[in-house]
């Protein structure tokens, strides 16, 4: 196979695999929690899916860039870690210094997530390329691509929020809907009474963003045991009003404040 055709095949395979991962990872929480409006960063869900597909296509191209498989696979690992580090840093909402330090620390370990992807692209390329000494039916060759598509799409399931976060989101939504029906501060659920301007501004469309560090919210909350999750939920209204809530175990009554 000519090198140009090899690279084009790598681009196509990477894009196909990336599309499966992008759709699963971007919709899994919506499938599991229908009706919970989760915040989607720019450029929107379809934009993120398109961008992810392009990035995976680029990684597939890099995996196929060299005639020998090993250099291309290693190049895929480096590029994958670098590109996703940029994306994570750009979409971080707080503690940018800590996020940068963490990304720098795990840069090399994260490479080994993308090295198997590069290997998979090269393996699928080999399966799809006719060999004079190997007769494989076209159906079996494309079955390998479908298997790879299913495997990579399955990794998108890891984007599902943890059980504590899902429980907190559902209770937050119920709490918010109850609060938006209140006509006075006294009618508000207790956690929302501490949110300045809620009655005046909590109107219209809203979405939930999962914060990375609950300690940035200046509220008093129960002391959680080491290792226990404390979901930090930021409620964003389309009119610009927002506030934050932290759910500590047992994830029933949050501590909320304008944020």
Image (cartoon, rainbow, N blue to C red):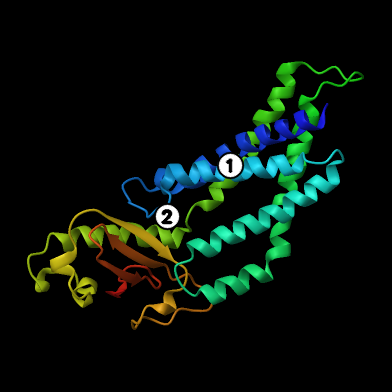
Q: Residues within 10 Å of mark 1 (few under 14, many from 20)?
A: some
Left or right side of 242 for 138? right
Of marks 1 and 2, the one in the foreground:
1
SS at mark 1 in the image: helix
Q: Quadrant of residue 206?
A: bottom left
Left or right side of 118 for 178? left
Closer to the camera, 197 or 150?
A: 197
Which quadrant is the N terminus positioned in?
top right
SS at mark 2 in the image: loop
Give the labeled residue for mark 2: 41
Q: Indicate the position of residue 63 as horizontal and vertical percent values.
A: 75, 42
Closer to the camera, 85 or 194?
A: 85
Q: CA distance from mark 1 to mark 2?
A: 17 Å
Q: Indicate the position of residue 84 as horizontal and vertical percent values.
A: 60, 56
| Nearer-N-terminus badge (1/2) | 2
Which quadrant is the C terminus positioned in?
bottom left
């Amino acid at each position: 196979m000519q090198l140009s055709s090899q690279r084009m095949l790598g681009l196509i395979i990477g894009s196909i695999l990336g599309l499966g991962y992008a759709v699963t990872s971007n919709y899994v929480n919506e499938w599991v929690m229908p009706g919970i409006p989760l915040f989607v960063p720019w450029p929107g869900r379809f934009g993120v899916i398109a961008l992810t597909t392009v990035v995976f296509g680029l990684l597939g191209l890099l995996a196929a860039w060299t005639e020998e498989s090993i250099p291309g696979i290693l190049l895929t690992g480096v590029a994958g870690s670098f590109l996703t580090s940029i994306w994570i840093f750009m979409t971080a909402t707080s503690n940018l210094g800590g996020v940068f330090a963490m990304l720098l620390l795990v840069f090399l370990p994260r490479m080994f997530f993308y090295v198997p992807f590069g290997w998979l692209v090269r393996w699928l390329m080999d399966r799809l390329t006719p060999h004079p000494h190997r007769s494989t039916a076209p159906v079996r060759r494309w079955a390998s691509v479908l298997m790879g598509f299913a495997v990579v799409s399955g990794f998108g399931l890891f984007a599902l929020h943890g059980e504590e976060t899902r429980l907190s989101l559902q209770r937050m939504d119920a709490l918010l809907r109850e609060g938006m029906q209140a006509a006075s501060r006294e009618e508000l659920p207790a956690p929302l009474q501490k949110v300045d301007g809620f009655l005046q501004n909590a109107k219209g469309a809203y979405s939930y963003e999962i914060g990375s560090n609950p300690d940035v919210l200046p509220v008093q909350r129960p002391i959680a045991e080491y290792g226990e999750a404390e979901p930090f939920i930021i409620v964003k209204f389309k009119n610009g009003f927002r506030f934050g809530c932290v759910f500590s175990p047992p994830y029933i009554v949050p501590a909320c404040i304008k944020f």
